[in-house]
Image: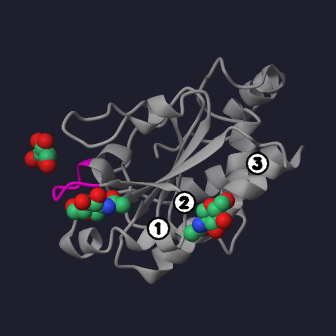
Amino acid sequence: MTSGQLALLCLLGLTFTLKGVTSQARCSVPEWPSGIDGENPLQLHAGKVLLVALMQGYCRYCWIQAHNLERLRDHLHNRGFSDVEMILINGGGALSRINNETYAQYTNLTVYQDTANNTLFNLFGGEKDDFIIYDRCGQRVARLTRRFSYLGHTYTERALRAIHRGFSWCSCSLDPQTSRTRRSANNWMVPLANN
Ligand SMILES: *[C@@H]1O[C@H](CO)[C@@H](O)[C@H](O)[C@H]1NC(C)=O
Ligand SMILES: *[C@@H]1O[C@H](CO)[C@@H](O)[C@H](O)[C@H]1NC(C)=O
Ligand SMILES: *[C@@H]1O[C@H](CO)[C@@H](O)[C@H](O)[C@H]1NC(C)=O
């Protein structure tokens, strides 16, 4: 078994035990709501693995995570995982909103501003500190909650590497061909979680 498979099996086992309040169906493709500023990031980054980080602008922990996310992206790009992108969603509450410029001191990653009624947090289906990962076809593949998204751990990097290689529960024709058979083998080895 490769380290990628191990990583994914490990993640599956972990996420399986976590219940998300707004969990969404695995492999679903979110539809960008009208009236939100900015282009649909899933279309903008189509063909890439996309990590969506749900954050709050008042939170120092979030700023550091935002900084370390960009470092992780650079690290992955330098190691050949070039089509991995990341975006940040700033929460829609007043405290987050007034701190929306703070991110720029910590990261160059694009920040999307959520609405007061949390349109984007609901769209991506997660809570503060969660990372939601989409595959090259824009399908929701994984959700890492705070316990696993903390970048002092390696779960996020391992998940991105595995998904980049095509280890996934979702079928995407843009994934590397070589992983097809191994992926289908994975399907019966692991329970399917709905987050
Ligand atoms: C922060 O919010 C203000 C006011 O809503 C807006 O004008 C500005 O473009 C926002 N900045 C960022 C980086 O999103
Ligand atoms: C943004 O990118 C530039 C050029 O790569 C880098 O020098 C700078 O440190 C980055 N800014 C932040 C806040 O990470
Ligand atoms: C939330 O706010 C946005 C604009 O700020 C609006 O387009 C949308 O309809 C609202 N959604 C709900 C469920 O109220």
Crowd class of label 2 (few under 14; some 14 to 19; many from 20; radius 10 Å): few
Which residue is under mark 2?
108
Which residue is under mark 3?
77
Specify which label sits upstream in the sequence, 2 or 3: 3
Q: Amino acid at mark 3?
A: His
- Which quadrant contains ligand 1? bottom left
Q: Is residue 36 visible?
A: yes
Q: Residue at x 40, y 79 (%)?
A: 59
Q: Amino acid at mark 2?
A: Asn
Can residue 116 be found in the magenta stretch? yes
Crowd class of label 3 (few under 14; some 14 to 19; many from 20; radius 10 Å): some
Query: Is ligand 1 less than 8 Å from the beta carbon at label 1?
Result: yes
| Eye-nearest disc, 1 or 3 | 1
Q: Is residue 66 left or right of residue 29?
A: right
Q: Secondary structure at mark 2?
A: loop
Which residue is under mark 1?
104
